């Protein structure tokens, strides 16, 4: 039998071990490189995994703080608002009562002054007619009526002059009758009123038996004394 033996090419044999060694080393290098890359990936993944929980924890803590602020703020404000409302309402009520009371008191005062003015005006009209009416046959009665309606300065003055005036009226047989034509209030208060009175007075005496009319204006100050309106000052204008 003939066995054919192939001759080995020395160049091929020489190159094969070297190529094999290079390939192996290349594969080892790739294998060694891959774990490094994988490790970097793992590190990055671990880093990423580690970072995400931290961010979630921070967000949860921020949300918790915001919720706590949202919850605590009304709790702090509500009692203060309630306190302010409770404090203001009584003050507003008191202020409204005070204003209404003051307005009511002012209206009552104005009404009282108006009533006083009307009463004093009527008293002045009546007293002006008494003061300007005289009868020599009834001098004492006329003087008594005049003094009864007078007070203060005018009463003192009339009392002092009444003695001479009485005798003069009797001697001249004088008579007079006064009628108030018009009147007006110049100033008024609850206790003192100034009234202007316009009078037509019919006068007659022994020297002039025919009656004549004298028109005059009198400024009369009326004061309330012991519940009555009396003349404290009489001025002929």
Image (cartoon, grey):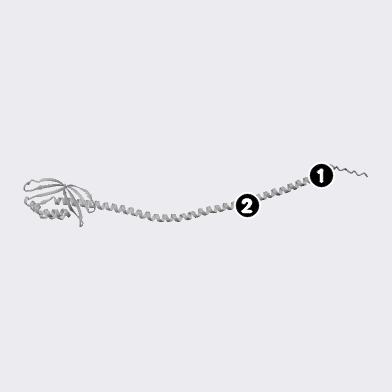
Q: Nearer the viewer, residue 75 or 26?
A: 26
Estimate the x, y position of residue 51 in percent, counting from the top left. 61, 51
Label ID, residue 16:
1
Circles 2 and 1, Cβ within 8 Å, touching? The answer is: no
Residue that appears at 73% across and 48% down: 32
Query: What is the residue that sits farthest to the right in this orientation?
Result: 1
Q: Nearer the viewer, residue 38 or 135?
A: 38
Secondary structure under tag 2 reads: helix
Q: Quadrant of the N terminus?
A: top right
Mark 2, residue position? 50
Query: What is the residue that sits farthest to the bottom in this orientation?
Result: 226
Report crowding for label 2: few under 14, some 14 to 19, many 20 or more residues within 10 A (C-alpha).
few
Q: Quadrant of residue 226?
A: bottom left
Residue 109 drawn above or below residue 12: below
Q: Nearer the viewer, residue 186 or 174?
A: 186
Estimate the x, y position of residue 82 in percent, counting from the top left. 43, 55
Q: Whole-Å distance between the Cαs marked 2 and 1? A: 50 Å
Q: Is residue 69 left or right of residue 124?
A: right
Q: Quadrant of residue 229?
A: bottom left
Estimate the x, y position of residue 99 in percent, counting from the top left. 33, 53
Estimate the x, y position of residue 29 in percent, counting from the top left. 74, 47
Q: Quadrant of residue 140?
A: bottom left
Q: Is residue 27 left or right of residue 232?
A: right
Q: Nearer the viewer, residue 117 or 74?
A: 74
Q: Is residue 78 left or right of residue 193?
A: right
Residue that appears at 63% across and 52% down: 50
């Amino acid at each position: 039998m003939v066995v054919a033996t192939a001759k080995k090419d020395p160049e091929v044999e020489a190159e094969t071990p070297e190529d094999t060694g290079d390939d192996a080393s290349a594969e080892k290098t790739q294998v060694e490189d891959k774990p490094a890359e994988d490790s970097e990936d793992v590190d990055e993944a671990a880093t990423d995994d580690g970072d995400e929980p931290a961010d979630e924890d921070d967000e949860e803590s921020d949300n918790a703080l915001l919720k706590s602020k949202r919850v605590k703020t009304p709790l702090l404000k509500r009692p203060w608002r309630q306190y302010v409302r409770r404090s203001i309402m009584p003050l507003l009520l008191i202020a409204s009562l005070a204003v209404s009371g003051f307005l009511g008191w002012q209206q009552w005062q104005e009404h009282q002054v108006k009533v006083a003015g009307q009463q004093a005006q009527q008293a002045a009209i009546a007293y002006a007619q008494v003061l300007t009416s005289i009868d020599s046959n009834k001098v004492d009665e006329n003087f008594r009526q005049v003094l009864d309606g007078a007070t203060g300065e005018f009463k003192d003055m009339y009392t002092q002059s009444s003695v001479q005036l009485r005798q003069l009226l009797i001697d001249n047989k004088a008579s007079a009758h006064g009628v108030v034509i018009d009147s007006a209030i110049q100033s008024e208060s609850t206790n003192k009123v100034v009234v202007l009175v316009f009078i037509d007075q019919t006068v007659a005496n022994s020297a002039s038996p025919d009656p004549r009319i004298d028109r005059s204006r009198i400024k009369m100050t009326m004061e309330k004394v012991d519940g009555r309106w009396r003349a404290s000052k009489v001025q002929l204008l």
